[in-house]
Amino acid sequence: MKDGSAFLNDNAQRIVDGMIGDAERLRIVVSRGPLGERLIDAGAKTVGSVEAGMRMAEAAMGGLGSVSVFMDRASQQWPFTVEARSSQPVLACLGSQYAGWNLSGQDYFAMGSGPARALARVEPLFETLSYHDIASSAVLILETAEPPPRATVEKVSKATGLATEKLTFLYAPTQSLAGGVQIVARALEVALHKINDLKFPLENVVDGIGTAPIPAPHPDFLTAMGRTNDAIIYGGSVQLFVKGSAKEAGKLAEKLPSSASRDYGQPFAEIFTRFKGDFYAIDPLLFSPAEVIVTAIETGDTFRAGRRDLKMLERSLG
């Protein structure tokens, strides 16, 4: 893909503009920060909504994905399911949606996701991705209850080369409706991230669909975080369409599900507590969907691995 040909931030800006126009219906609050940055609170000091979370997810994918909600009758306790699709999954998920930009500082903690990352290109991941975005404004999504402080806004401005008033920060905590939805809309993204870790050629991934149940929000952060992770680890499903040999597609399917991890088998909140809150001590292979379907489009072969654990979902999601 040629530099700028997808225009991630321009796509996301159109989604953001639509959210602003529908702010009352979405129950979001739009304001300007002290440096002129646009702030969109989708669930911190406002109720927010499931639809706001869906729009956040589409903005996070740089407009290269579509997000919808449907009812999955196979999961009787948690039938409402979010689905994310993309015909450019590598760029949508790794180049934009992945929460890979550490914006923490002093008393503020946040990982940035969204297309502003493709302008800043400060993460090692962008050594793998050749895409460079071209934009006059930028959009960043934050999983947090607080708007970014002045230092963070200035950091993003410097890294993207844009004036602060050209930046939009969409934020919602994990405990909120919108926050929970935009997190579980990442089943496809976590699959792509694991694919990269497994050294499968990213250029061979040509299309993808991911689903995960929408958990009930919870006021306790650890519980809410556990639920959103378990929704993907034990309830997520992904189908990928890949180029290459059937053998390589089969090997990918075998390694991709969360059940391939040594830490699989407990609710995520318990795993997190067992490792004393150290994310980096948890096996990174755990962060992937419960079941995968990999189709080799050049041979017509399809491979399946893993399974959804509905009993674990009921245990975790309540």
Image: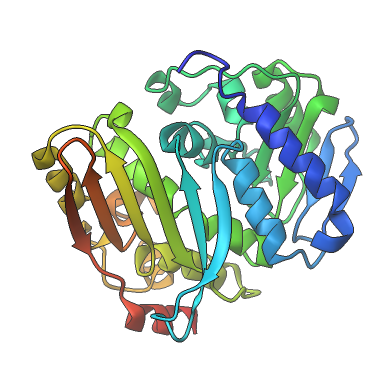
Q: Is residue 173 visible?
A: no
Residue 14, above or below 268: above
Taking the spot 90% from the left edge, 45% from the top edge, the residue there is 31
Residue 195, above or below 163: below
Where on the picture, by quarter, is residue 145?
bottom right
Q: Position of residue 289 (x, y in %)?
A: 34, 58
Residue 35, above or below 234: above
Is residue 129 toward the left or the right of residue 260 in the image? Answer: right
Q: Position of residue 160 (x, y in %)?
A: 67, 20
Taking the spot 64% from the left edge, 67% from the top edge, the residue there is 175
Q: Residue furthest left?
A: 247
Is residue 71 toward the left or the right of residue 136 in the image? Answer: left
Quadrant of the rendering where the N terminus is positioned: top left
Q: Position of residue 189 (x, y in %)?
A: 43, 46
Between 255 and 246, the one lying in front of the other is: 246
Is residue 140 toward the left or the right of residue 188 in the image? Answer: right
Q: Is residue 275 visible?
A: yes
